[in-house]
Image (cartoon, helix red, strand yellow):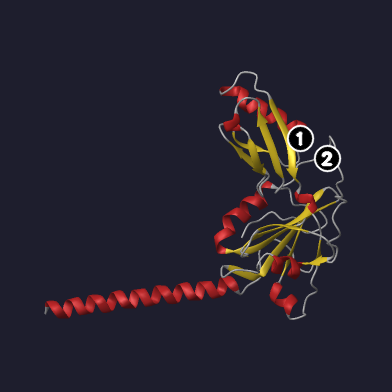
Amino acid sequence: MAKQMRACAQLANAIVAIGAAASMLLLSGCFQGTRGGPIPYNVADFKQPDSQVITTVDDDYKIAPMDTVKVSVYQVGDLSGEFEVDLMGNIDLPLAGTIRAADLTLRELDKAVTARLSEKYLQNPDVSVALKSSARRNITVDGAVNSPGQLPINGPTTLLQAIAAKGGINGEANPHRVAIFRQIEGKRMGAAFDLTSIRKGKMPDPQVYSGDIIVVDGSNIRSIYNQFMMSLPILGVFNPILGLY
């Protein structure tokens, strides 16, 4: 009798496990095979970005997401270093914590870091901020790709080429939901694209430009993507992007 009860329990556990696996498979299939979200597809007026040719860093240069800045605190080496501005436009500094950097000039960021360190930690800190590298000279490919990061642009480049150059999409990717974020007429714009339709020739393969941020949708980057959406005013000639997934 005891053996029979153990066998029934094992069978029940197996059924539950199989059901859970089937549910995950079904959910995975739904996730990877659908369009959707708040970013519009088939945007006819997704223009070229604002001119972003940079020969020197002028005093009025505005820091962009994925820029790398060098922060130096005189005689405090532990607080100095090179820091990448994340997709939400922030940098994380030792002691100072998270500071908004995007859309600030280098001088404004210098003042912000100085003020933060002066609040609790240092008396009259001597801070200097310099631009190490500019994302405006590159394309940023993030999300569910095999090698996320920046991609230098040395000539005409399309969306498929940019993603392929970063190792292609990974197993978590939803190829039907890929977003390009771009600065147009001083505003952050977004448009969605379907890689599957592009590969089949049903949609054109759009050209991408320096300063563009490409985000491939995937379950493991959903929260980062949503934070990015919330942190930037994405309004303009397209439908206002106000919701989340």
Q: Residue furthest top?
A: 123
Location of residue 118 in the rendering, given as x and y in whole percent from the top left corner: 62, 22
Q: Label 2 crowding class (10 Å Cα cut-off): few <14, some 14-19, many 20+?
A: few
Q: Which residue occupies the foreground of this view, 78 or 99?
A: 78
What's the residue at 63%, 56% (across, down)? Answer: 225
User: Do callouts 2 and 1 mark residues in contact (Cβ within 8 Å)?
Assistant: yes
**Local SS, label 2:** loop
Q: Nearer the viewer, mark 2 or mark 1?
A: 2
Q: Is residue 10 left or right of residue 179?
A: left
Q: Which residue occupies the foreground of this view, 243 or 114?
A: 114
Q: Is residue 14 left or right of residue 79?
A: left
Q: Which residue occupies the foreground of this view, 34 or 112?
A: 112
Q: Which part of the image, by quadrant, shows the C terminus?
A: bottom right
Q: Is residue 211 visible?
A: no
What residue is pinned by disc 1?
Answer: 106
Q: Measured along the vertical axis of the image, is residue 83 above or below residue 120? A: below
Location of residue 35 in the rendering, given as x and y in whole percent from the top left corner: 66, 70
Location of residue 207 in the rendering, given as x and y in whole percent from the top left corner: 82, 66
Q: Which part of the image, by quadrant, shows the N terminus?
A: bottom left
Q: Which mark is residue 57?
A: 2
